[in-house]
Amino acid sequence: MSKERLFIFDTTLRDGAQTQGVDFSVEDKRQIALALDSLGVDYIEGGWPGANPTDTAFFADRPTLNRARFTAFGMTKRAGRSAANDPSLAPVLDAAVDAICLVGKTSTYQVRVALEITPEENLDNIARSMEAITAKKREPLFDAEHFFDGYKVDSDYALSCLRTAHEAGAKWLVLCDTNGGSMPEEAYRIVSEVKAKLPGAALGIHAHNDTEQAVAVSLAAVRAGVRQVQGTLNGLGERCGNANLCALLPNLMLKEPFASQFETGLKKENLTQLTHVSRLLDEILNRAPDRYAAYVGSSSFTHKGGLHVSAVAKNPQTYEHVPPESVGNKRSMPVSSQAGRANVAVQMAGLGTDGDKPDLGRLLQDVKRREFEGYSYDDAQASFELLALRQQKKLPAYFTVDRFSVTVESIRDRDDNLASRAHAVVELTVAGDKIRNTGGGNGPVNALDAALRMDLGK
């Protein structure tokens, strides 16, 4: 049985740039675009040429993509102007791109309040704009803004906007849940009705996450008949974000009924890059990854409870819905106060102690006692390893601190403010040699650290 093709449209560089706290440079955009192309998405929306210096520079020197269609974003022409003479649209039409995606109103309320024009003028704007893209020999896409809200109020007009765009050459009609308030059941019903009334049109979905359901809305729309899915890496986007491709892609490729019915431009080996690409984006943005993100988070396949670890050690399917390797992630079984013997056994096996098994129970109780006292081994694998080696008497004695002393004195700084200065003296035995070092710092710990570092590590 042949599968239907689903097309993946990434708008990280355009809609994702509207995320509060996100500010891409030209080089950031280039690096992300190349990563997306390697991942295997079909369309990469790079931004809005002419809207800001960054996007203008990015499109002036477009990245070399191997498979994705480089796409420019813009809006339909304004009433009273031709497409060629609209200062917002002209740079988009002139951009060296493969496709152009224009957003246009499909809600009578939005046309009246936001654009302050008549519904008929809006239809003309849509038609002339799509025709202009076709004349430029670019692939035309129409983002039907506020479509779901508009359809609920005046379905005839919302459909007339889609029909106008389609007849004017739009290859894709993308239904946008712009305010992010639609429920999955609503999306399924409305997409089904649109599919029935426009049988020859190729439909897409663009969902926002204001009700934490952008992924669910997108999946419902796919079941109802859309064949293009728009989203962003890590769910970036205005307000609460867009549909998260890092969840959508594995859902479409690994979960039923989608995996059996559809194929995307990604192969299984491409999907194993997903965690890397997700974390690359966060690295570029200089922010910590969401450790609890589905599929790609560092906690997505972390098993902390002893009963869970015991079962996972026998068969990972007991507590994992997909193999972590399928999305490029990895399994983790940290040791903590919630752990059981299985956690400790797994960690000790990783240390290569099979031939000399430690007292797992005693080590586990030691961990729990220390965590009760305030220590934390959950994210401190090296500390656990040191504890285990020390208990087994396998921890090498690299050095011994024989004695130390620290003095702290008050001094006046250059601005005559009272400050403190610490001085430490440390006596060590390193490889049988007696060593005496001194160090200064702005506190006792800093001073001791400075003194110890004088010879350790040489």
Image: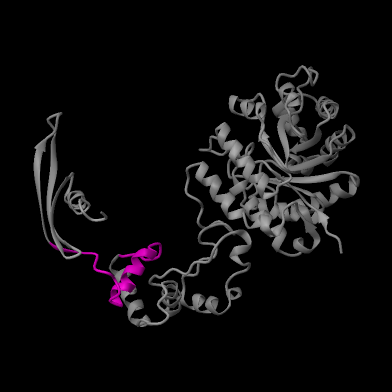
Q: In the displayed structure, does residue 32 sit left or right of residue 226?
A: left
Q: Is residue 275 magenta?
A: no
Instruction: Identify the residue at image location x=81%, y=38%.
Output: 158
Residue 10 seen: yes
Q: Is residue 9 above or below residue 220?
A: above
Q: Quadrant of residue 272?
A: bottom right
Q: Quadrant of residue 260?
A: bottom right
Residue 354 in percent (x, y) is at 42, 80
Image label count: 0
Q: In the displayed structure, does residue 279 sit left or right of residue 399?
A: right
Instruction: Identify the residue at image location x=71%, y=19%.
Output: 87
Instruction: Identify the residue at image location x=69%, y=59%.
Output: 268
Viewer-closest of 372 and 361: 361
Q: Is residue 154 above or below residue 344?
A: above
Viewer-closest of 226 and 56: 56
Residue 221 in percent (x, y) is at 76, 52
Viewer-closest of 323 and 338: 323
Residue 174 in percent (x, y) is at 77, 42
Residue 368 in percent (x, y) is at 34, 73
Q: Is residue 380 magenta?
A: yes
Quadrant including the C terminus? bottom left
The residue range painted magenta reads 375-402
